[in-house]
Amino acid sequence: MTPSMTTLDPNSPVLADIETPALVVDGTLLAANIERMAASARRAGMALRPHAKTHKSPDIARRQLRAGAVGIACATLREAEDMVAAGITDLLITSPVVGADKVRRVVELHRRSAVMLTVDHPLQVDDISAALGANDMPLALLVDVDVGQARTGVTGAAECLALARRIQAAPRLRFAGLQGYAGHVQHIVAAQERAQAAEGAGTLLRACADCLSAEGLAAAVISGSGTGSSGFDLGGRCYTELQVGSYVFMDADYARLRERDGAPLPYESALFVLATVVSTNRAGQVTVDAGTKALAVNGPPPHRLIGIADGGSYRFAGDEHGTITLAPSAPAPTLGSRLLIGATHCDPTVNLHSGYHVATGDGALAYWPIVGRYRSTPP
């Protein structure tokens, strides 16, 4: 299936009452992205565990589960708590849970809903085991393996085996498998280089799995990958489930990636920031009300501007503003007109907002709340 460009009009009556800056989602393209990834996984006979760190939305998680996902990955305990509160189950928390308060909360979460955790140190195993009560069901743990990102994870097969044995021996814990998230692979632009890096990550993870298997500790779950490497990992022999996230929205960074044939990844940009033109006093330039508090800065500049003739280029101009340099001879948008700005880095852009305005394509507009954002008090 060939992706379709958005047909959203930033100045349409559907979006007219939205206060800017605001997140807008093309619901038709979002649905197509979800189904396209799910269909790829079905063809490959592989499971999907989409990452909620991208969208932080129970509404989107439900659609991913209905499309066939086996569960949802959460980067933080806060995301998992909010997902469970919204009725989403079968969660994997992909970052180690450290600290007495977080361990207590994750045990309370486990008592309400099925969760899996990742660990990379014996003290994490001991703390979680000690916090569980005699009547608690066993809590499933994955050993986190560093497959090249140098962020978290055990750094070799021997360390992996020792940690898996410790889990297996601990009261009320169950060794469930391995995680090897290859975050360092996902944004390599050239397809062949990205494929080689993905293969290298899979080889490291497979070596750990083989070491465990030889000692009678089968890794039933091997979870990892990501949107950028999913096309290669779906055809591999390492993972049992893929943690894909950004495919639902895409962003300026993923737009640069290419397949082996030179084509872009088969997912379309569905996430935008709706902004208003607030100044037109400078020739060849307009200013909009979307700056660093509306768009993440840790990525390339926005790659799509909708509502400006012949394109244009966006530049951050402070917390609340951005400037757009117009193409030569292009007519300037009028004061008060609206633009749609394609997301920079989608995950942290989402975290800046409290909800999505979702255009469904039939003239309707829905509002979906964003959960799992950092806050100082528990839910």
Image (cartoon, rainbow, N blue to C red):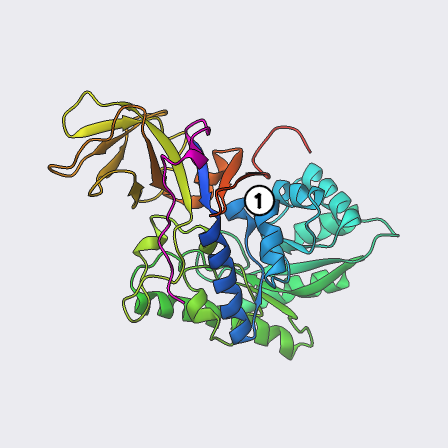
Q: Is residue 192 left or right of residue 122?
A: left
**View extreme (left): residue:** 329
For the residue pair 154 and 256, the one nearer the viewer reads as: 256
Based on the picture, tell me whether residue 48 belongs to the magenta stretch. no
Q: Is residue 145 left or right of residue 118?
A: left
Residue at the extreme bottom of the image, as rendered: 214
Which residue of the protein is positioned furthest toward the right in this rendering? Answer: 135
Compared with 29, 46 (above or below) is below
Q: Main secondary structure of the magenta part?
A: loop
The quadrant in which residue 294 appears is top left
Relative to 250, say whether 325 is above or below: above
Give x and y (percent) for residue 195: 37, 69
- Per the image, the residue denoted by label 1 is 57
Task: Report the front residue among 227 and 209.
Answer: 227
Q: Amino acid at mark 1?
A: Ser
Residue 98 position (above or below residue 16): below
The percent coordinates of residue 188 (x first, y second) are 33, 59
Q: Is residue 19 visible from the viewing direction of this image? A: yes
- Quadrant where the C terminus lies? top right
Residue at coordinates 71% horizontally, 42% vertically from top-left?
Answer: 85
Magenta stretch: give its range.
1-21
Q: Is residue 5 magenta?
A: yes
Q: Can see residue 295? A: no
Nearest the viewer among 137 and 215 is 137
User: In the rendering, at what x and y percent does residue 9 appear?
Assistant: 36, 40
Residue at x 72%, y 40% (from the top left corner): 105
User: In the rendered view of the protein, which quadrant contains the N terminus?
Assistant: bottom left
Q: Residue at x 42, y 30 (%)?
A: 16
